[in-house]
Image (cartoon, rainbow, N blue to C red):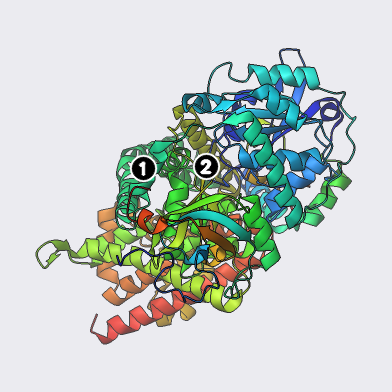
Amino acid sequence: MSEALAQQLCIALIGNPNCGKTALFNALTGSRQKVANYPGVTVERKEGIFETPGGRRIHVLDLPGTYSLRARSPDEAITRDTVLGQLATEAAPDLVVCVADATNLRLTLRLVLELKKVGRPIVLALNMFDIAERRGIGIDMDALSRDLGIPVVSTVAVRRNGIAALLRQIDRLAPESGSNGPGGWREPSAEQVRSAHGDAQRILDACVTVPGHPDIWTRRLDRVVLHPVAGILILLAVLFLVFQAVFVWAAPAMELIATAFDALAVAAQAWLPQGMLRSLLTDGFISGVGSVLVFLPQIMILFFFINLMEDFGYMARAAFLMDRVIGGVGLHGRAFIPLLSSFACAVPGIMATRVINNRRDRLATIMVAPLMTCSARIPVYTLLIAAFVPHRSIAGFVNLQGLVMFGLYAAGIVSAFAVTFVFRKRVWRGASEPFIMELPAYKLPDPRNVLMGVLLRARIFLRRAGTVILAMMILIWFLSTVPGAPPGATDPAINYSFAGMIGHAVQPVLAPIGFNWQIAIALIPGMAAREVAVAALGTVYAVGGGEAGALGNTLAAHWSLATALALLAWYVFAPQCAATLGVVRRETNSWRWPAIMFVYMMVLAYTAAFIVYNVTTALGG
Amino acid sequence: MIQALVTYLIVALAAAWIFWSMILPVRLRAALRRRLGLRMVVCGMLDRAGGCGGCDCQDCPLRR
Amino acid sequence: MPPAGLVRSDAPGDEPCADIVQLGRGARGIRGTVVQVGAETGTVPDCIAAAELERLLLEIGFVEGAAIEILHEGFIRGDPIAVRLDDMRVALRRREADAILVRVAGGSTHAAGSES
């Protein structure tokens, strides 16, 4: 805690999931983050600074959404410890702003009653007050304030000046900083929760009038969206649309980025004198960053849809529909979003597993996320399929190449389910987290918040591309360039590098699955990102220019069908991505899980490739 | 010659960064930071908008 | 669909009192009032401790006296279920819903098929 921070006033925002707390936080600080409608998405700790009209500088914390101070997850534990002032490194908040969805007050009132036991100054902010008014919900704010014994203000976070009353109240209430001691609170027993509910109900009856039939739209929509048949069809249609968008809409932008980076590399090649530094800049830096940035359009489109669905309120419904489907193998309904994200890239997918509270459920999801076919595999798949699978139709309308592509996707999904099943039923047989989730009322998404959420995701992804992935790229460039080729060498330089040595060394191990030393070498730079293996194959076979067609022809001439299919099978499973392993390391805070992931995926990859190679060979491939 | 030196310097930096941010155990790094007089990061502001959950500094003492 | 009853057809019909059912065994469309949260279910093999589940359910608003109605059910074995709980909607698995006892309101047998 620095001196400067200590002199600022600290406030904390706390509230139920879906109360619009993050929108309020955005309105207060102006920092654009994410408003979620999906319970539990606001699990990241966010803070910001703003100034009140009275000229006070306020330090504000956005705490994870919760129904109670009792913690069931690390995120909730942070909420509790922050409010109680039990975190040694952080000053206890001087003021707690409890944010409530004005259309759904009951549970927040109970939370307020629990918070009052902590003994800090509290303000209750009735957010989304406009929606409550429109629905004819009458709230007697004076009576509410009197009954609760705390100030009550109304806010509309998504509207300009919608938070003026809250700012005034903060100015008025702000005590001197540092006056806050540790809070007093004890975990309530079930009986105490019951009696608090009773108190909340009495206050609700006295202060709030609800019209006879609230929110018909949510009810009507749910009747279709949660219908056992129509609901599933809608979900499939939505997923299809999302995938279509991710792969089709992103294509022009991806091509643009790829072309731009190629041009940049060519320009750098022309500018710089021949030598190592030029190689590092063009082959390491530029192509490294380019091969990561190329996924940005897909990630942004994917998160655009995810944010849209969250804000609309559909994500909770999707989790409801999917719970039994993926729950059968032991995944939590909420694992659905991270797994969906993993089709673009496992890195954001693994980061998105934070929506899962239970540690085991979360680990299981993290472990199988890389089995989802990420878009980095697509260049490898398309290269090999185009070179080895004949372009012809089966039964008149099914394209064989498309069928193989589909099969590879399906293999990833099926194996992910199988692996989860084994993990959950054999490794962690402990209690599974209950699936209890509020289904929020549908709301029209606020476009600004959706876009800001997309930008936030893009920023997080770029920060990783800019740090870990770039550093990895440089190291892998080093491995595949140094030492250089001796004078008079005829083979490509990579053959003499460390990567070449490693490739030659491991080749005997890979021989039973049909890989030659060229493949073994290409797999090493492929650790940086899967699709780099395509470029590496081009280097090893000395097919310049990244001409995919030419490389395909060369491969078709050099490899047997069995080798090609074995490599495809290998790529379904192989942990060929340093970035994923790095993110798993960071998310789980230990080397144990990335190590387990690496080993199990390697075993699966080897086994699958072995089977495919030998079966194809036996069949005469 | 200078080219090679600069190249090796960059590679060494990348290796050091990976070692520091990923391989070094969190506790050891926290101890080193303290020894070196580096600030323990309780997440900063907009550039760390993701906060402790979102940023990957691992130096945040809030993170368990 | 078979004619909607109070209790799903696959549930054992050994309830001590006919109009009190475990929420996890209720059919879609039943309405009623919560009479007990944290009931002994005896059929929860793989779940968290009963006391913990009780508090979890209480915290999200399942409390004695709350009005409840099963609105929707999932397409695989009718699980999970979505219920109206006073003026909010909550989704949960039947396994956990078993810990909630509901006194079914009269005439609910007709409510299942009609406008809810």
User: Measured along the vertical axis of the image, is residue A426 above or below residue C86?
Assistant: below
List the single residue furthest toward the front. Answer: C106
Please, what is the three-letter code of the amino acid marked with disc 1? Leu
The image quadrant that residue C45 belongs to is bottom right
Q: At numbered mark 2, what does the secondary structure look like: helix, strand or loop? A: loop
Q: At numbered mark 1, what does the secondary structure look like: helix, strand or loop? A: helix
Residue A161 shows which numbered tag? none
List x then y, in percent, for residue B1.
Answer: 62, 45
Residue in the picture at 64% in, 16% down: A164
Return the residue nearer the eye: A105 or A591: A105
Locate the N terminus of chain C by quadrant: bottom left
Quick one: label 2, few (<14), some, or many (20+) residues within 10 Å?
some
Establish whether labels 1 and 2 are both on one chain: no
Residue in the picture at 86% in, 41% down: A183
Residue A234 makes an appearance in the image: yes
The mark lying in front, picked from 1 and 2, is 2
Taking the image as shown, residue A331 lies to the left or right of residue A430, namely: left
The residue that disc 2 covers is C87
Please give the chain letter of the residue carrying mark 1: A
The residue that disc 1 covers is A221
Return the residue nearer the eye: A70 or A360: A70
